[in-house]
Amino acid sequence: MRIVFIGPPGAGKGTQSTRLTRQLGIDYLSTGDMLRAACRDDTPLGRKAAEFLQSGRLVPDHLVHEIVRQRLAEPSAAKGFLLDGFPRTVPQAEEFDRWLAANGQKLDAAVSLSVSRDELLSRLALRGRQDDDRHVLEQRLVHFEELTRPLLDYYKCRNLMRVIDGHGTMDEVYARILDAVGVK
Ligand code: AMP
């Protein structure tokens, strides 16, 4: 199964999607994790991405595409994967579609977690990651609205979009996700 997970920061994407990948036995691929690891390891790509990560801006597409392409080429991704945090813009989704077509693969579902702005801000305040200061957070929410939200229509047009109510307990949200992707 191949799934993309879409949702604003704080929506619970990371928690829910790692749980789903464990249950489905597919690879979990988070572009945020990959980019942070590249920065930590001080790779050439990590050095270019660092300033964007720190300021909460989106890392330029060509860098993100490079890191995703490399990861998807690893043998473990052949059994299926869930992408958390990619695509984040329509051009990224178009690039991903080209990659899928070139590799004879298709996407099974795009899952979006829908959470109110107030709830997001209070969850993010509790999380306290380094790039989570208030200004950076606001930036990331603005980017989500402007750049990522159009993806919902992109995948709706392709009949792949599953919008999930992200309120409630972790188990309640997870049950909705399983239902939406057709897992019993
Ligand atoms: P995340 O862990 O998904 O919240 O991502 C953390 C940060 O990594 C974001 O604020 C961006 O700077 C960068 N990032 C992650 N995924 C992408 C992507 N698909 N496109 C551009 N930047 C990304």
Image (cartoon, helix red, strand yellow):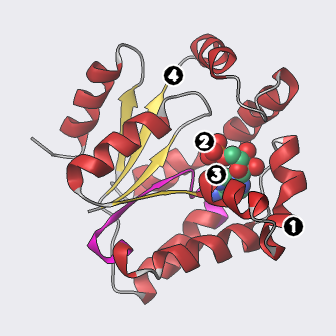
Instruction: Place residue 76 in its image quadrant.
Output: bottom left
Q: Residue at x 74, y 74 (%)?
A: 62
Q: Residue at x 66, y 77 (%)?
A: 66
**How far across and down, in percent of the image, does residue 150 sit?**
60, 47
Q: Which residue is mark 4?
A: 115
Q: Which residue is mark 3?
A: 32
The magenta stretch is 77-91
Amino acid on which disc 2 is placed: Arg
Q: Mark on residue 48? A: 1
Q: Quadrant of the C terminus?
A: top left
| Left-right relation of 155 to 180 | right
Mark 2: few/some/many CA within 10 Å (<14, 14-19, 20+): some
Mark 3: few/some/many CA within 10 Å (<14, 14-19, 20+): some
Give the number of the mark in front: 2 or 1.
1
Element class at badge 2: loop
**How far across and down, in percent of the image, does residue 74 sit?**
44, 80
Amino acid on which disc 3 is placed: Gly
Q: Residue at x 24, y 58 (%)?
A: 25
Q: Of callouts 2 and 1, which one flags the residue occurring earlier in the amino acid sequence?
A: 1
Q: Of callouts 4 and 2, which one flags the residue occurring earlier in the amino acid sequence?
A: 4
Q: Which residue is mark 2?
A: 149
Give the number of the mark in front: 1 or 4.
1
